Amino acid sequence: MTERLTGTINVIVPTGAVGAGVRDSDMQHGLAAGAHAIACDAGSTDSGPAYLATGRSKYARDSVKTDLAILMRAQASAGIPLLIGSCGTSGCDMAVDWMRDIALEIAREEGLNPRIATLYSEQQPADLVSAAAEGRVTPLPPMHGTDAALFAECDHIVALMGPEPYIEALRQGADIVLGGRTTDTAVIAAVPIMLGAGVGPAWHAGKTAECGGQCTVTSRDGGVLIRVGRDAFEVEPLSPTNACTPATVSAHMLYENSDPFELLEPGGVLDVRHSAYAAVDDRVVCVSGSRFLPRPYTMKLEGAAGGPFQTIMLVGIQDRGVLAEIDRFVAQMHAFLTARVEATMGAHAGAFDISLRPYGWNAVSGTVIGAPEPPPREIGLLFVATADTQEIATQIAKTCNPGFFHMPLDRDQELPSYAFPFSPAETERGQVYDFKLNHVIAVDDPIQLVRIVLSEKDALLDA
Amino acid sequence: MPKLSQVCRVRSKNAGPFWITLDLFFADGAAFDRYADAPQLGTQAIAEIFDVDAALIKRFTVPDLCVVKLSYPRPAAQGGQLERDMHGGQQYVRLLDIEL
C-alpha cells in the first residue's frame, strides 16, 4: 500500500473518444471525487485516412451529441473546464466547426450559456512549402522528402497541437475548449500543467488516460480519473466496479506506440524508462518517476487526400473443385478479367487495377499459404476494381461480371454460377483516400500555427 | 520445440498511419529470459515475415512486463488502395507458429 498523493490536480477522462459512449454515472463519480477539469479527445488517425481527407466524422452526429450533452451538463453543474481535442475525428477546421455547431445546439436546447473557445490548427499547403524551403519541416521515418507537391496534393493538413493553446483559451475565460487536431495526451495534460502539477507526471497521466478505460482491467467499463501531483500521479476507474492494476497501467504505454519508453510530444519527449507503478489499493495505481525532457518545439503534420475510385463485387463459393485449388483459380480469374477489360475497354479503362481477395483463405495477409492446408468449406471472393473515376470503376466491374460469376476452374467444365448476395451485383464503394504526410514542423511559439476563437458570454442568447 | 503461441500472447496494432507494432507478452520471467533474445524473434526474422527492411525495424525488450516489442513500417500507408488490414490487428497471426 502506498500513501495517497495530496494537492493533486484531478481530471475526469470519461471516454477514449466523444461519440464512443460517455456515462452520466461516470461523470457523477468523477465530480464527487473533486475534479478540476473534464478532458478527452474526439478523434484520431486510427481509423484511416478518409476522415481527414473528407473532414467528416467517424462517429454519427447523434452519438456525438448524446455524449457531448452529458459532458456539457457536467461542466455547467460543476463549473469546471471541459476540454475536447481532435474534434470531429480529424480535427481539421470543418470538423471543429461541426462539433461547435453541435455544442451550440445542445446549449440552446438545455439552456446552458458557456463561453466556448475553438482552436483551429489546419494548415495551408503554400505555408508549408515555404516552411519546408526554410528547413523547418522534417520527414519522420519511414517517409522521405519534403517536396512541394506532397503538400499540394493534400485535401486537408493539420498540425497536432500541444497543451499551450488550451491553456491560453482557458486564461482568456473559456469554459469549454473545442480543439482541432491535438495529441491525445496534451488535451488531458493541459489543466494539470496550467495549475502547476509536475510536467512529467502530467504528460504520463495524459498518455495513460488517452483511451479512457483502456488502462483498466475491464476496458469497456467506463473512463478514468487522474490525480496529478508534483512527482507522481494516480489513476483510477470512474466506475466503482472496475479497477486499475500496475500491470494494466504500465502495459498501456505499449498500446498503439511504436516505442514503449519514449513518446515524442510537442515541445519534448515523455520518458517512462524510470517510471514505477505501485498499487495504492485494489483499484488505484500510483505512477512515479516519469520525466518530460524538453526539446525544440515541433508539431506533427498529418495530411490526407482523395485518390482513385473503387467498385466492388462479392461472391460466395462452396464449389469443392475450386476450393481444392483456390490459388490457381484466383490467378486464372485475375488474368482472364484483366485481359477482358483491356480487350473491351481499351485505353478508356486508364490505369486500372483489379484485386481479387479470397476471404476464408488468404485475403487478410495476401501472402501465399505455404504449408498444405485442408480446403475451407467456403470462401467469399471479393472483387475490387480501382480506376480514375467511379464511372470507369463501375464499367470495369460490369465488364468483369460474367467472368466473375461463371468462370470454371477448367475450360472443359460446365459453367458454374457462384453465389452473389446482392442485386445489382456491383457496389460503388467511393474514393480511395491516402495519408500523405508523416512530418514535423518546427515552430518558435506553440500558438504560432493555431487560431483561437472565443465566443462572447451570452452570445447564445442572441442566436 | 515450442511454438511462439505456446509461450506468449501476441498482439498487433497500428501505431500511427505508417507503422505496425507487435507486442509479445511472455507468460513469466522464465519464459521471457529464455526466449526474448531468440534469433527467430530478431529483427532479421521479423523483416522476412513481413517483407520489410530489417534496418527499419525497432525492437525493444521490457523486462518489467516480460514483453518483447517490435515495430515495423507498413509497405504502404494505412488505408490506401490495397489495404487488407486497416488497423493491423490480425498481422500477429503470422507469428504464432514460429518455432523457438
Image: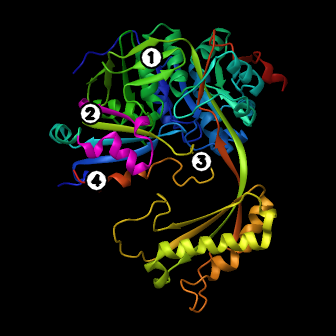
Residue hosting label 3: B79
Residue hosting label 4: B98
Q: Which disc number belongs to residue A202?
A: 1
Going by the numbered disc 2, the residue's amino acid type is Leu
Going by the numbered disc 1, the residue's amino acid type is Ala
Disc 2 secondary structure class:
helix
Residue hosting label 2: B65
Residue furthest top as drawn? A196
Which comes before the other along the chain, label 2 or label 3?
2
Taking A382 as reference, is A289 left or right? left
Mark 4 surroundings within 10 Å by alpha-carbon count, few (fewer than 14), some (14 through 19), many (20 or more)? some
- Work out whether disc 1 and disc 2 sit on a shared chain: no
**Range of residues picked out in magenta:** B38-65
Mark 2 and mark 4: Cα distance apart in space: 21 Å
Circle 1 or circle 2, nearest the eye: 2
Image height of A368 relative to A340, above or below: above
Mark 1 and mark 2: Cα distance apart in space: 23 Å
Which sits in the foreground, A445 or B73?
B73
Mark 1 surroundings within 10 Å by alpha-carbon count, few (fewer than 14), some (14 through 19), many (20 or more)? many
Mark 3 and mark 4: Cα distance apart in space: 28 Å
* Chain letter, disc 2 residue: B
Going by the numbered disc 3, the residue's amino acid type is Gly
Image height of A121 relative to A434, above or below: above
Picture coordinates of residue A107, whole percent (x, y) = 71, 29
Mark 3 and mark 1: Cα distance apart in space: 33 Å
Quarter the N terminus of chain A occupies: top left
Q: Is residue A289 visible?
A: yes
Picture coordinates of residue A100, whole percent (x, y) = 72, 30
